[in-house]
Amino acid sequence: MSAPTRPEETETADHRLRHTVAAGVPLLLGVVAAGLSWRLGLGSLADPGPGMWPLMVSVAMVVTALVVLASRPAASEERFGRGAVTVAIAVASLIGYALLFERVGFEVPTVALLVLWCRVLGRESWRTTSAVAVGATAAVYLLFITGLGVSLPHIVHT
């Protein structure tokens, strides 16, 4: 029969497990994303393929997760609250953005995403929200489509 564990030992083991899971999930996602990025084709630095930037982000995610995994867990962690809900909404909105991007073009989903993030999640005024949503979408259009000739799906044709 084993000796009863003290509550602080259970709490410490539980804390380490949460720390490992918190680092392990992004590590796993980063490795999977890196593999998928590789399959898209990397191209070269002079002529990047569609998988180049996703691979770079994936590698950064893996490195960050490894640093967190190697670090000591903090003495305490923040409880789930409104901040966690905000993050979940932001992640869900990015998934929705990615799903709509190819079908609708980038303009409408980009404006909608920025309105959600500024007005709902950031609680900005309508004036600020409108300026950021329209201004950032126009800047992306001018920079990438007009200036650099990037082939983004879009509904506005010049």
Image (spheres, grey):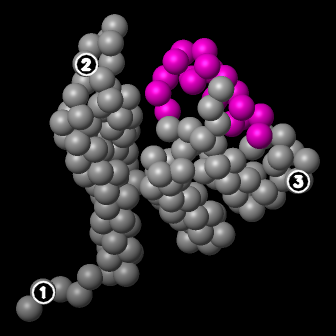
Q: Which residues are magenta?
A: 134-152
Work out which residue is located at the far bottom of the displayed protein and give it.
1
Secondary structure of the residue carrying numbered label 1? loop
Quadrant location of residue 155?
top right
Asked whether, in this view, residue 63 is left or right of residue 151, the answer is left
Residue where numbered disc 2 is placed = 43
**C-alpha distance separating marks 1 and 3:** 62 Å
- The stretch drawn in magenta includes residue 89: no
Residue where numbered disc 1 is placed = 2
Residue where numbered disc 3 is placed = 126
Secondary structure of the residue carrying numbered label 3? helix
Q: Magenta region's main secondary structure?
A: helix
Report the front residue among 91 and 85.
Answer: 91
Percent across and percent down for residue 158 are: 65, 26
- The stretch drawn in magenta includes residue 149: yes
Q: Amino acid at mark 1?
A: Ser
Of labels 3 and 2, earlier in sequence is 2
Is residue 137 shown to the viewer in this render?
yes
Is residue 91 shown to the viewer in this render?
no
